[in-house]
Image: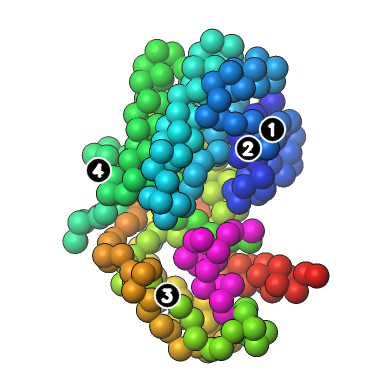
């Protein structure tokens, strides 16, 4: 199976491409250097040239903060990019399966006492990033109603080796390694530690994406989540214990956002594919720490 992967050199793409190859598929990796998803002509040409059996659409402005600081770019990449891809597939590869990678941010915050989000929960995004992803999700559903095989993966938080320090666990790991190496004083800068999130390992997430490419899985929306809600401050303390590094925690006002909850149920994904998370949280944290030790030791 020929699988075109957009955003292939991003955090998730660098795990997904070798995973697909290990399954015996032919991944066709593209990234922003060779395919601007916001350019409809370039997307049409790429689809016509590749003639893929499936597409995994990872290309996105994936940071909540980055999307907030540049709303026009966020919608140009996250929404218009998805629209361009859907148009091109409908015209040039109507039998290809599209995995449209979205986000648990489309649901907005989880109310106090509420169970983790299922796919039938209303889309009420509270961030600009979430709104751009919700718009793409709804567009994908509209194209599915016209006959395209569109699978909408709503991925909740994930982390692991290779993640940029724009994201919370990677930020913590980088700072702790810098403290460990004596680059920084033993003071870790953080934002609101009271929010809760649902974290998976990126390697489990790419396994879920590969499972959703199976033609036997019905198109539709699928949460990719651990189902476990964890407080950010508890994750930081767990990472410090895992690394054996102690630091004073300093909350920086500019990083503080209101505390919110988020968690998703992956029951539908499990029923359709048999997928379940396999990598323990402590293993994710350890691999994240080792990755930053390697990166910060590189010449």
The front one of 254 and 285 is 254
Q: Nearer the viewer, mark 1 or mark 4?
A: 1
Q: Earlier in the sequence, mark 3 or mark 2?
A: 2
For mark 4, give the secondary structure: loop
Q: Which residue is mark 1?
A: 34
> Whole-Å distance between the Cαs marked 1 and 3?
36 Å
Question: Is residue 19 covered in magenta?
Answer: no
Q: Which residue is mark 4?
A: 124
The front one of 257 and 259 is 257
Where residue 295 sits, quadrant-wise, is: bottom right
Q: Residues within 10 Å of mark 1 (few under 14, many from 20)?
A: few
- The reply to whether discs 3 and 2 touch (Cβ–Cβ < 8 Å) is no
For mark 3, give the secondary structure: strand
Where residue 55 sits, quadrant-wise, is: top right
Q: Residue at x 73, y 70 (%)?
A: 294
Q: Which residue is mark 3?
A: 190
Q: Which residue is mark 2?
A: 32
- The reply to whether discs 1 and 2 touch (Cβ–Cβ < 8 Å) is yes
> Whole-Å distance between the Cαs marked 1 and 4?
34 Å
> At which x and y percent is residue 103?
41, 45
Q: Is residue 72 visible?
A: yes
Drawn side of residue 173 relative to residue 255, left or right:
right
> Whole-Å distance between the Cαs marked 1 and 2?
5 Å
> At which x and y percent is residue 135?
35, 33
């Amino acid at each position: 199976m020929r699988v075109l992967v957009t955003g292939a050199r991003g955090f998730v793409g660098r795990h997904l491409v070798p995973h697909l190859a290990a399954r015996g598929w032919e991944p066709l990796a593209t990234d922003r250097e060779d395919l601007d998803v916001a350019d409809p002509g370039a997307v049409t040409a790429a689809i016509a040239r590749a003639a893929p059996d499936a597409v995994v659409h990872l290309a996105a402005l994936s940071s909540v903060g980055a999307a907030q600081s540049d709303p026009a770019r966020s919608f140009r990449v996250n929404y218009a990019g998805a629209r361009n891809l859907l148009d091109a597939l409908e015209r040039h590869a109507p039998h290809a399966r599209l995995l449209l990678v979205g986000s648990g941010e489309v649901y907005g915050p989880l109310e106090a006492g509420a169970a983790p989000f299922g796919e039938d929960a209303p889309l009420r995004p509270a961030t600009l990033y979430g709104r751009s992803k919700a718009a793409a999700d709804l567009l994908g559903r509209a194209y599915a109603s016209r006959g395209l095989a569109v699978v909408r993966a709503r991925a909740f938080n994930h982390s692991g080796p290779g993640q940029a320090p724009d994201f919370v666990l990677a930020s913590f790991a980088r700072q702790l390694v810098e403290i460990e190496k004596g680059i920084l004083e033993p003071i870790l800068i953080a934002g609101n530690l009271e929010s809760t999130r649902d974290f998976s390992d990126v390697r489990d997430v790419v396994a879920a994406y590969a499972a959703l490419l199976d033609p036997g899985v019905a198109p539709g929306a699928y949460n990719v989540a651990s189902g476990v809600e964890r407080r950010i401050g508890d994750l930081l303390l767990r990472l410090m214990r895992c690394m054996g590094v102690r630091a004073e925690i300093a909350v920086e006002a500019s990083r503080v956002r209101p505390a919110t909850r988020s968690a998703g149920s992956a029951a539908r994904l499990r029923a359709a594919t048999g997928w379940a998370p396999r990598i323990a949280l402590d293993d994710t944290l350890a691999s994240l720490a080792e990755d930053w030790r390697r990166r910060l030791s590189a010449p």
